[in-house]
Amino acid sequence: MAITESKQQQAGDLLARISLRNQPALKALYALAGGQLYAVALRIVRKPQLAEEVVQDVFVNVWNRAQDYAAVRSQPMTWLISLTRNRAIDVYRAQDDAVSLSTHLDDEDGEMWDPEDSNAKTPLQQMIGKAESAQLQICLRALEAQQRQTLALAYFHGMSHAELAAHLAQPLGTIKTWARRGMERLAACMQSAGHAPVCA
Amino acid sequence: MNYNKPELLHILAGEYVLGTLQGKARTRFERIMRQIPAAQSAVEQWQARLIPLAHALPERAPPRDLWRTIEARTAPKSTQSAPQVLGISRWRQWFSISNLGLVGAGAAFAFAMLTALPMLQRMNAPEVASMGGLPQSYVAVLSGADAKAAFVVSAPRHGKSLSVKVLTAGAIPVEQEMRLWALPAGGPAQLLGTIPNFGNGEIQMTGTAEEVLAKIPNLGVSFAVAGAPAGELPVQFAFRGPCVKLW
């Protein structure tokens, strides 16, 4: 779901009020962003109970650290989503069965994406297709299929290099190369397109 | 590892945001981010590049009880959050014992604090980070005869610059300027400076806020003929208000 300027503005205003210990503002922020943050968390930890734990921790963290937001140069929703992803990755990592979880993803997520084939996209491809930045879509399409799939699996599922290697049945070194080269090409593509490097 | 190499920070930041940086390496990089601004900046760049992917996820309704749990964990119980509400509590206490007795003072204060916050947040990062709450600052909210908050003045505890924000000062008489004064208890007013351009701006102090304002209970604003001698004490202050430590 695209983040509108209005939503960013609302989130920023609410963070300012939360930094003054205004709990109704925290509730309003939950109403505004809770659904999106829960979706981000659930995508990574894949268990509702864990996703609930992640979102709970994020909002408690926001309550205690809202004033820190001023020190970063991200948009409010970018900051919130980043907090959520980081917490979700930590929670996911703390699970003993993290590897087995990641190797039982939806089958569709394991399919290679043919950028020339616009039909019958997998859920993962659809999400990439819905990325609100047209430039990001263009740059992702410019990657090799393996690189693109590696980046998407890591980003959406919080997989480590070892888990990606197990999931894609490739040597660890190959996975690291795909990920690194994919990121380098993505960054170069975004930069050459004049994408503002700092502010989301 | 030499974390001063931009290309290394770029790679590590990318892996951190992507999620492939794991375990001790991830924890170590989080520490580096707090120590090296370039690392934090590199992470923000990667977040900006990749965040549209997360935006594309369809929202999911969280479980019904989730908010209640969050609410319980963030309830402003004195034992749970005392250190972080200390600054605000002191304000409340000050207003309750002060002689203001002005209707709406609380609301005016809340509004003024909202306005002051961005100024406070411009202070250097370590001082903010060490607090876990609002930054250590001196803050004054000045009101006129109508009891409406008219100015917010603030300075980081160890900063030499006073930030002045005009809220509702009204019309400025022609060929006059506004001057900001420290009002010591039982002593003559001390000129802090002229409010720049009749509006928001900065006033440089002769020392740090701690040195200049620690024993000053009130600040005042007067009107003066533009260019009048700095040592000329005002007959009256059009605006005045308490100056307090925010920690």
Image: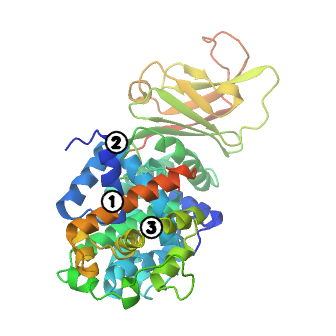
Res. A27 visible in picture = no
> Which class describes the residues within 10 Å of circle 2: few (<14), some (14-19), or many (20+)?
few
> Which class describes the residues within 10 Å of circle 1: few (<14), some (14-19), or many (20+)?
some
Could you tell me residue B210's position as x and y percent? 39, 29
Residue lying furthest right: B174
Q: Which residue is mark 3?
A: A81
**Numbered badge on residue A180:** 1
Q: Quadrant of residue B116?
A: top right
Q: Could you tell me which residue is drawn at 51 percent across and 69 percent down?
A: A141
Residue lying furthest front: A116
Position of the N terminus of chain A by quadrant = bottom right
Q: CA distance from mark 2 to mark 1?
A: 16 Å
Q: Quadrant of residue A177?
A: bottom left
Dots 2, 3 in contact, CB < 8 A: no
The amino acid type found where label 3 is placed reads Ile
Q: Which residue is mark 2?
A: B6
> Which class describes the residues within 10 Å of circle 3: few (<14), some (14-19), or many (20+)?
many
Q: Is residue A120 left or right of residue A162?
A: right
Could you tell me residue A176's position as x and y percent? 27, 64
Of residue A114 and residue B121, the one placed in the foreground of this image is A114
The amino acid type found where label 2 is placed reads Pro
Position of residue A168 relative to residue B154, above or below, is below
Q: CA distance from mark 2 to mark 3?
A: 25 Å
Could you tell me residue B238's position as x and y percent? 69, 31
Q: Is residue A65 left or right of residue A103?
A: right
